[in-house]
């Protein structure tokens, strides 16, 4: 029986471990994927640190990781000929949905209540091989670089967040320049935003935001913030808020800067509940619409990603700041945890 | 110079006064309206009680009241022939907008930042005559009863709130059965709601909600509330929340009962800020969309109201619980303030 | 091996034949349904008459019929526990879609280019049993009458056609009062139409339209048609056109009566191409939006149907004009072909 | 009394004449504009040639021209301080709407049935001065070049046509590369189109289309057209059709190349009616949505234009192929009529 390198949460508590384990055998409707690249998500860092959410959700031992790309090396016996086959170059939607609930049947599988997540609820992709349901495999164009292909799962969050609002010829405020926020910037540009202002407390991330195409990347606590943000939009406020930080201060500031009748799209999750929130003035009397965003639309978001990348409208490579062999996973995860990175890609077998 | 009966806020502090004052002369773009019926809004009660908002906004002396209907008795010299004329039977949009700002030019005059409100910023309609800009006059069908015609300003809030969401073949929760909530019930029914559950703490209002057409009208603090609400929608939760109460408990409960992917439309204004609000679970991860609602869409909402009333799809008369001559304004306002009423209509000159 | 009664197209040419044939064995992902009721669609009449479309599409021998309801009597070995099971009372979506093409993956399976249709491309339901893919089975509430449950496939066309446009507080013109047109009338009413005018050349159908809830049902060639139609909508024209006839005269007349900025939803298929069509004045300069409608949205339309029927908002029973045992299929099909019927339901085994 | 140079349609029949006439006096709600640049529209060529439409609509003598920019030199006495003032640099919406009809009150003034057009129904802008209603004046940013500012009226048609559909990450076919088609190309790009294929019979215009940013600009009658068009979109067909030619062959070909579920936006007006149009296969069974486009949305389209130009997302200058002093109007109009031009700008007083 073949074995492989894998990074696992071995038991409850902080940290990951490197191990050798058996290559999984795909179930009847599964495909086995040889991983070519895998990238680190903020969620992986939460599991690494063993935060409260992880303690309630993760059942060790578990191979972690859910962003990846690779080549199909075997398929289950019920995989049909019109579905992905051995040799196909694929990325994976990490959300495994039931397909039979009302949400799935209404085309809203991204909010299926029965969702299980690769690398969270079942074994993940920080390994040489991973087995996933064939329905979760997404074929990539052959010329897509593997590091870009791996990023798509997370890129899809950004594309989904931006595509729920109309940014065409609009002024856009992006609050939070972690990976999802950074990726939202070129998407907003590609979809027609007039002016994009991005905020973050970290100078490192503001520098990446500038490179990602923001017209202004600025610390929201700077004394001249309000003046510079308003100057960037000719004193008119913002039409659209893209909230990627999860910080309640960012949400309040962003909604405060929004024009009446504006739209907000919220992806960032807060560490706790929201307090002292002026719903009357920030949302109701302004006639603002707020969209909560979860996951990626299946499969609209993936088609959008493919087009954005293939046409060159979005170049994700400047957002990748570090690359490691999977054997250096410890350094990679610690770098991600430091906040001084964009996306980090790891390569098994190097 | 002709004089008329009028109800005024004479000076800062609680209460109104009855007075005689000069009939206003319409400006060049105004129409003078002989008031046939006027109805009481919750805002009028706030001004009567002299709450904090009133203290900051109202500049006495001021004729109060902004919901009314009547007949045009004179027009200013710049009113054009294709605009309302002497003898026309009209109701009034209470929001006087600038017409030149970006919001107005984008067709979003209901959130014009330069809005002035009849009976709040300029003299209102608790009087025998009121002068308003011709742009604010809306011609009624001749067969519309005056008590119904007067209610339209407030009815428009309900129509606007419901029409921003898609209730067709959906399950709908209406939280708050004050006048706007009560009026939202038949609107949701007329626009295709499958099941409507309404909540309020007051048995008096729950009774009105039942009469207004709710499938279930129930106290949200009742021990069997959750079971009965879920039974009403076959255990599936609600597709749509119509929040009319301004109570943070109602907002939280309503969003909690909403299905993932649902929509919420919020009209109710809270007395303070929102606290301990679980934005992650109530909005973001559920993929919920929240619409803040202000005023009435000019003039889409008014056309909708006309159609809803003319076709008989909505009958507002069961929601009118009291009628008074304007001379009994004190009793009328106190009744409204008691919470034991639906809409209250007053008639000048009786 | 069990046999059953079935109505088949035995060879190319007009007519159907009654036969006995083997009860089908369900495939691994199929369910076998004992048919309780089946209804006749216009398409069945086309196949019966062996029109040009049928000659190109139908490969005899074939069991015909695609509208039905029944009880699952057996399931294939790959049917999962969260899918319909033996004993379930179901209706069927007649379009078998591939699930893997771009349309399917975008949630637009109703226009899947690989669609195969029950009773057209594979054996249908004019029989005691029919085998269908489990994905096509839709569970009905137990209290839904079988004749109503059978109609849903066709009712879904009407619901889809109406739901693509916004009829809330709008004036609606329905052209063509065959079964789909008749069913569109109560749907438009349930979804908030202010006024509904229906047209057809047949007095028999106009009578059914009146019973179905039209405010005015009228022959569009009547000398006073224009006056009466305009009177019904106070001289303002129509906001929405629901075209169900396929007649080019109806399309032209309907678009001509539409207000600028109106919407048209087209389900009716014409026997040939469109000629002498004034696209400039009927569509472009009027700013009209035209929606082509195919099939039923999977599964939004089915959820809408369930809600419309369960809430009592739509009662399909007045539209059912004839009921027959399946053994009298010849009389049933001839009655449908005569044009002097609404929906016709047949019952196997009686 | 001051006089000015003006180009007029002096009497029924082909041609224009140069004349001197009195500078108009602005009415109470008008502004007098000193014209800095004016551009030629296809409609002006129709009036010049005195086609059938012109014969029915134009009442000579009339100063022609409706695309222009200039500086306000006087205002009527009822122009308010919050409206455009003397010295302002403006362009003009050419459609003078009533403001009181249902369309205007619903925010659809672009299809107001009472529309009068500058240079068509009232004196136009091929002159040193033009008087227009203050409501039609649109303030430009001071740094907008005058030749670009003049083009906006026509540019707005292109922006409106593209903005009615969702081109984000979509494949787009633009049929017809006259000025409006040419301008639609960079708009579709700015709003997120993945791939843009443009068609025209004229090699001159195809060359301009390529410069305007089309991925492929091609003669639709070329033998390899279908192959090259499909290659450009990886064999998948088009998501969106932007029809700018008015040619029925283009409409049929474009709808034929559209994917099921696609959207078409039609601006081009045909010389006659549409014949032999396969509505069943091109629209209905494909589930296609068709949008008729008229004018510009007031004022959404103008805000979009401002943003597109200010951000540099669209550069209209490559589309301007000729510039003339107004005194050489004859050469300018003949050049436009030849079909061998993009936009042509003329300057009064040079």
Image (cartoon, coloured by chain):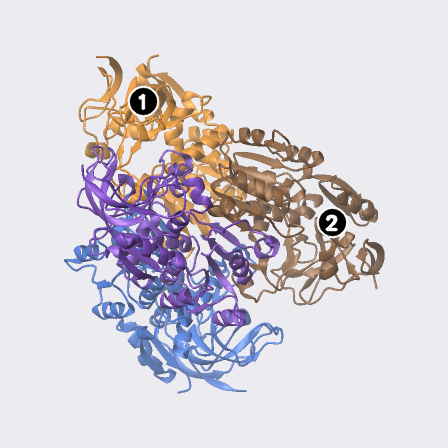
Chain colours: A brown, B purple, C blue, D orange
Q: Is residue C81 above or below residue A344?
A: below
**Residue C144's quadrant in the figure?**
bottom left
Q: Position of residue C298 (x, y in %)?
A: 49, 63
Asked if residue C11 can be seen in this view, the reply is no
Q: Is residue B258 above or below residue A300?
A: below
Identify the residue position indicated by label 2 in the image: A38
Q: Compare residues A101 and A28 and report the one nearer the observer.
A: A101
Q: Position of residue C182 (x, y in %)?
A: 31, 67
Q: Is residue C123 above or below residue A82?
A: below
Q: Compare residues B283 and C285 and report the one nearer the observer.
A: B283
Q: Residues within 10 Å of mark 2 (few under 14, many from 20)?
A: many
**Residue D18's quadrant in the figure?**
top left
Identify the residue position indicated by label 1 in the image: D334
Distance in Å between CA atoms under marks 2 and 1: 63 Å
Please report the residue visible at 82 percent of the width from the left and 57 percent of the height from the top: A4
Q: Residues within 10 Å of mark 1 (few under 14, many from 20)?
A: few
Mark 2 lies on a secondary structure that is strand
Q: Compare residues C168 and D10 and report the one nearer the observer.
A: C168
**Residue C45's quadrant in the figure?**
bottom left
Q: Position of residue B334 (x, y in %)?
A: 36, 56
Q: Residue furthest left?
A: C223
């Amino acid at each position: 029986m073949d074995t492989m390198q894998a990074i696992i949460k071995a038991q409850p508590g902080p940290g990951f471990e490197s191990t050798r384990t058996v290559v999984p055998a795909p179930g009847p409707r599964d495909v086995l994927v040889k991983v070519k690249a895998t990238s680190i998500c903020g969620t992986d860092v939460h599991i690494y640190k063993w935060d409260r959410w992880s303690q309630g959700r993760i059942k060790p031992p578990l191979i972690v990781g859910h962003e990846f790309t690779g080549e199909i090396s075997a398929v289950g016996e019920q995989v049909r000929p019109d579905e992905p086959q051995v040799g196909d170059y694929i990325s994976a939607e990490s959300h495994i949905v039931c397909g039979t609930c009302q949400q799935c049947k209404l085309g809203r599988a991204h909010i299926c209540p029965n969702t299980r997540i690769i690398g969270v609820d079942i074994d993940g992709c920080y390994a040489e091989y991973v087995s996933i349901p064939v329905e979760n495999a997404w074929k990539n164009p052959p010329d897509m670089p593997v590091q870009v292909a791996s990023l798509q799962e997370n890129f899809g969050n950004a594309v989904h967040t931006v595509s729920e609002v109309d940014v065409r010829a609009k002024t856009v405020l992006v609050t939070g320049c972690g990976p999802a926020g950074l990726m939202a910037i070129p998407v907003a540009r590609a979809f027609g935003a007039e002016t994009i202002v991005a905020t973050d407390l970290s100078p490192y991330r503001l520098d990446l935001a500038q490179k990602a195409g923001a017209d202004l990347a600025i610390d929201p606590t700077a004394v001249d913030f309000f003046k510079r943000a308003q100057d960037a939009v000719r004193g008119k406020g913002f039409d659209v808020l893209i909230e990627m930080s999860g910080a309640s201060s960012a949400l309040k500031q962003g909604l405060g800067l929004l024009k009446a009748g504006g739209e907000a799209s919220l992806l960032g999750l807060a560490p706790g509940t929201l307090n002292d929130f002026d719903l009357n003035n920030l949302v109701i009397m302004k006639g603002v619409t707020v969209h909560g965003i979860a996951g990626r639309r299946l499969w609209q978001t993936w088609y959008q990603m493919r087009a954005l990348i293939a046409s060159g409208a979005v170049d994700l490579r400047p957002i990748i700041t570090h690359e490691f062999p999977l054997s250096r996973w410890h350094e990679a995860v610690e770098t991600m945890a430091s906040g001084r990175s964009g996306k980090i890609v790891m390569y098994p077998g190097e």
